[in-house]
Image (cartoon, grey):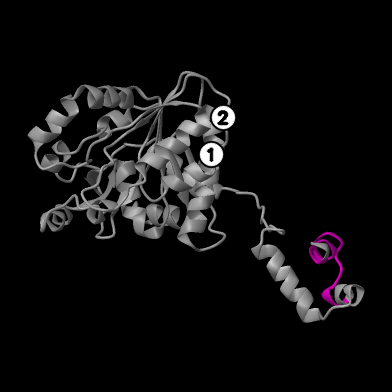
Amino acid sequence: MRVARLYYEFGCKQDEIAEREGISRSKVSRLLDRAIKEGIVKIEIVYPLQPVHELAESLREYFGLKKVVVIPVIVDHPDAVRDDLGRAVNSFLGEIVEDGDIIGVSWGTTLPFVVKHLDQYHVKNVTVVQLNGGVTKNYLSTQSGSIVEGFVKSFNAVPYMLPAPTIVDSTELAQAISADSNVRQTLELARRARIAVFGIGRASYDSILVQAGYFKHGEYEELLRKGAVGDICSRFFRLDGNIADPELNQRTVGITLEDLARKEYAIAVANGVEKAEAITGALRGRYINTLFIDEAAAQRCLELLE
């Protein structure tokens, strides 16, 4: 602790510390490394998230969106970008959430980074509702429960989960599940939510929906042949924004994209050039009105519009 304070707080050089403490310079280096590993020293890089305004304004004007935040890619790693997006979304939620609000949340790879940065908000009578089913058909977790729980803790809210698979085997089964009194109540709250926060999935074999076992052999290949580029709340659409497979859409348990489009704040969070087609399809479908995105994906989206 003494070596750490001399080095980090008082700016002493390692040679000076070694002479002062009567130890070797290499031991000073080892002690400083140990101080970090044991949590005695914590290093935090604090930098402002200056949005890339020109890209943001171009997207906002083209699609008539309420708000677009484009995050600069300071560290070119997906988790670093998602972390910055999570911080930005947290700041925005602090501006718009009011007493008595209903907040709808989905699940996916991006939402946990939003949860990570949520503050403790001083609002009353808030409800948090799950927007689409999160029960998988194999061992894989969608993290839907922990995402809802994170929002509930931050807003001191009442939770409403959707304890059902997001895609089922038939339209009749989807209708039967949706008619259950608990599920029906949750879906009604999802429709009434003023604010919805969700990710945009890319149509690929790496999709959580594929890995979670929702598709039988050949089904996903057929979906891709029909032009699916992405999904929101497990509902797939094409690059032109239209639903890719109406029959699959009827087998999906959760909020519809039409209901999502009616939200006062339909907040999409997405990153990566590989998701540009999915993001563009979502924008063309008018399913979102508030977008948090990274600069590489934003640039690619504008290129797709040319």
Image side of residue 184 versus residue 201, left or right: left
Image side of residue 185 versus residue 36, left or right: left
Circle 2 crowding by C-alpha within 10 Å: few under 14, some 14–19, many from 20: some
Amino acid marked by disc 2:
Tyr
In the rendered image, residue 52, in percent from the top left (x then y), is placed at: 55, 50
**Residue at mark 1 to residue at mark 2: CA–CA distance:** 8 Å
Element type where label 1 sits in the image = loop
Element type where label 2 sits in the image = loop
In the rendered image, residue 257, in percent from the top left (x then y), is placed at: 27, 35
Q: Is residue 14 magenta?
A: yes
Q: Quadrant of residue 248?
A: top left
Q: For this rendering, which residue is in front, 154 or 33? A: 33
Name the residue at 46% across, 34% down.
Answer: 151
Q: Is residue 91 in view from this perspective? A: yes
Name the residue at 55% across, 47% down.
Answer: 53
Vertical placement of residue 154 versus 35, above or below: above
- Callout 1–callout 2 Cβ contact below 8 Å: yes
**Secondary structure that dominates the magenta span:** helix
Image side of residue 277 versus residue 120, left or right: left
Which residues make up the magenta segment?
Answer: 3-15
Name the residue at 19% across, 38% down.
Answer: 252
Amino acid marked by disc 1:
Leu
Say which mark, if any, is on residue 121: 2
In the rendered image, residue 139, in percent from the top left (x then y), is placed at: 26, 53
Say which mark, if any, is on residue 118: 1
- Quadrant containing the N terminus is bottom right
Say which mark, if any, is on residue 41: none
Q: For this rendering, which residue is in front, 140 or 188? A: 140
